[in-house]
Image (tube, rainbow, N blue to C red):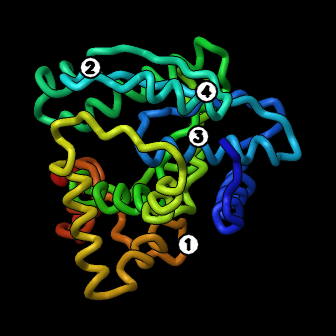
């Protein structure tokens, strides 16, 4: 397989690598490889970077078979990795059984949690110091809005994060690429991504949020870019203060509702 990326893609990848310090000399990077379009592109893109990088780093891939009724097409994945000259590790699990039947209240979250755990543990066991995931810019924006709607928190995943438990650093080199750009490029390769075997495909909270963002962006083209801008740290942000705790509220109540008595009034306790 001939390895090449259009300049636009390469610039976005290198910007993420440099800005967030994702790669450096001597890294051993294990790519979480589901076989879908995003992880397939990530593996290809990192091979291109590896070929053209001024420093040396190693690449490997791990596929976690989740144990769905439709098994992973391992020969397809092995052939793709062979063409890219990247070693592949396949881990068979029963995560689907745990997520869909034992933890049905939030199967997607459970599935993602256990899948990441397997990837991170595999990296540590095979002495990879970094794990690369294929989350792109759309994923980051969707996660940001999902966190607000379903968790009441302002957060999204970071381009780089260190995991003390496994001594592994997680990197996300695709954070400056849009999903449509990845899809357009992967269609030019002689490889057809493996379809997702998940029965929840298209019915998750993420898909609902994706549809919401797409619909709002059709009405106002600035909705997506505004959400993306809001993900950045901003010293001028105007947010409510954190919720006061019980003891803090007791003191405020005493100070505001009984100011004449003062803090020393024994009856105010």
| Depth check, front residue: 138 or 41 | 41
Where residue 82 is drawn, which disc sits there? 4
Count the numbered circles shown.
4
Residue 203: x percent and y percent? 15, 49
Residue at disc 2, secondary structure: loop
Instruction: Tell me if residue 250 comes above or below residue 65 in the rendering.
Output: below
Q: Are marks 1 and 3 in contact (CB under 8 Å)?
A: no
Identify the residue shown where x is 43% and y is 47%: 37
Name which of mark 2 and mark 1 comes first in the sequence.
2
Kindly report which numbered mark, 2 or 1, lies closer to the viewer in this rendering.
2
Where residue 67 is drawn, which disc sits there? 2
Q: Disc 1 marks which residue?
A: 235
Q: Is residue 38 left or right of residue 45?
A: left
Q: CA distance from mark 4 to mark 1?
A: 48 Å
Name which of mark 3 and mark 4 comes first in the sequence.
3
Q: Is residue 229 visible?
A: yes
| Depth check, front residue: 56 or 230 | 56
């Amino acid at each position: 397989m001939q390895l090449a990326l259009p300049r636009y893609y390469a610039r976005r990848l290198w910007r993420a690598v440099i800005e967030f310090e994702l790669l450096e000399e001597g890294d051993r990077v294990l790519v979480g490889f589901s076989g879908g379009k995003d992880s397939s592109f990530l593996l290809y893109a990192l091979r291109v970077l590896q070929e053209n990088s001024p420093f040396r780093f190693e690449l490997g891939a791990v596929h976690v078979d989740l144990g769905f009724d439709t098994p992973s097409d391992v020969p397809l994945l092995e052939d793709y990795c062979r063409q890219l000259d990247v070693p592949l590790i396949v881990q068979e699990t029963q995560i689907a059984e745990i997520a869909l039947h034992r933890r049905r209240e939030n199967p997607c979250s459970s599935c993602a949690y256990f899948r990441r755990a397997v990837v991170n543990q595999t990296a540590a066991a095979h002495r990879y110091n970094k794990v690369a995931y294929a989350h792109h810019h759309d994923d980051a924006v969707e996660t940001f809005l999902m966190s607000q709607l379903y968790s009441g928190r302002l957060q999204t995943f970071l381009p780089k994060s260190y995991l003390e438990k496994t001594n592994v650093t997680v990197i996300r080199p695709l954070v400056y690429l849009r999903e449509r750009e990845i899809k357009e490029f992967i269609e030019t390769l002689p490889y057809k991504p493996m379809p997702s075997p998940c029965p929840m495909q298209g019915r998750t909270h993420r898909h609902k949020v994706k549809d919401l963002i797409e619909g709002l962006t059709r009405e106002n083209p600035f909705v997506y870019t505004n959400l993306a801008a809001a993900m950045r740290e901003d010293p001028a942000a105007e947010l409510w203060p954190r919720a006061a705790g019980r003891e803090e509220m007791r003191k405020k109540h005493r100070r505001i509702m009984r100011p004449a008595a003062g803090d020393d009034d024994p009856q105010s306790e």
